[in-house]
Image: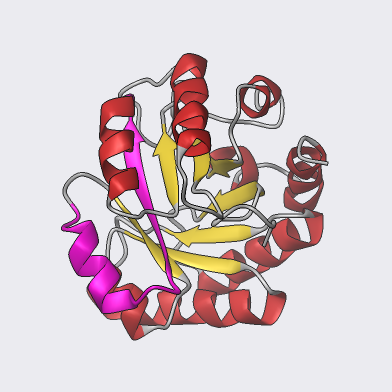
Amino acid sequence: MNSGLRFPRGLYGVTPEWDDTERLLEGIGAAARGGMVAVQWRRKTIAPNDRLSQARRVAELCRQLGLLCIVNDDWRLAALIDADGVHLGKEDGSIAQARLALGSEKIIGCSCYDDPELAAKVLQADVDYIAFGAVYPSVVKPQAVRATLEHIRQGRRLVESSRIQPRSAVVAIGGITADNAAPVVQAGADGIAVISGLFETPDIQATASRFAALFA
């Protein structure tokens, strides 16, 4: 992990809705070879019977590859599979409860949408990263609220003004591709979270390399 940051700087892959676990693991491996630093296991449509199995296999692969594995929405599942942490949205329960369950060493990230005031509030609750988005129109969440580059800048000012070191990271999400990511990084994003713009591209490893180069 980057010194000075509580969440690594760089490409943060978010899993697509693939039921084919082998295909998903291959995609994660390709992205890792290209320079991806963390994975968020995010599945909204998976059958309950397959949920634990796929999450566990992704976490195991991440351990082998030296990637951080974050579980979307569900800190109980994150604890069960010994993931590296959890990503929480507005409706996903208490940060304090998640921290109590997961312990101080695990990562908690939080969706802040287009709301720097929410970001300031969750930073006081000791989250490891704040996420703003959708920065661009999102294929995955077309109805998502839109965050601007100014929100990224405000988030960066917030984390840099904190006295807690290492500091929390700023993550951007939503419609980001290798072609439009540079302004987001320049605005102050420590990490860029990408689903379709990474995993739905013809050459996942090459795409990951293009993202990683923005942080070099």
Q: Residue at x 46, y 64 (%)?
A: 70
Q: Residue at x 66, y 48 (%)?
A: 9
Looking at the image, residue 35 sits to the left or right of residue 196; the answer is right
Looking at the image, residue 140 sits to the left or right of residue 201; the answer is left
For residue 151, which quarter of the picture?
top left
Q: Is residue 43 above or below residue 115?
A: below
Residue 80 position within the rendered picture, expressed as x and y whole percent measured from the top left: 33, 84
Quadrant where the N terminus is found in the figure? bottom right
| Observer able to see residue 136 | no
Q: Residue furthest front?
A: 163
Q: Which residues are magenta?
A: 92-115
Q: How many numbered callouts?
A: 0
Which residue is at the front of the view, 142 or 75?
Answer: 75
Q: Is residue 96 magenta?
A: yes
Which residue is at the front of the view, 157 or 16?
Answer: 157
Q: Is residue 25 above or below residue 27?
A: below
Q: Is residue 131 above or below residue 183?
A: below
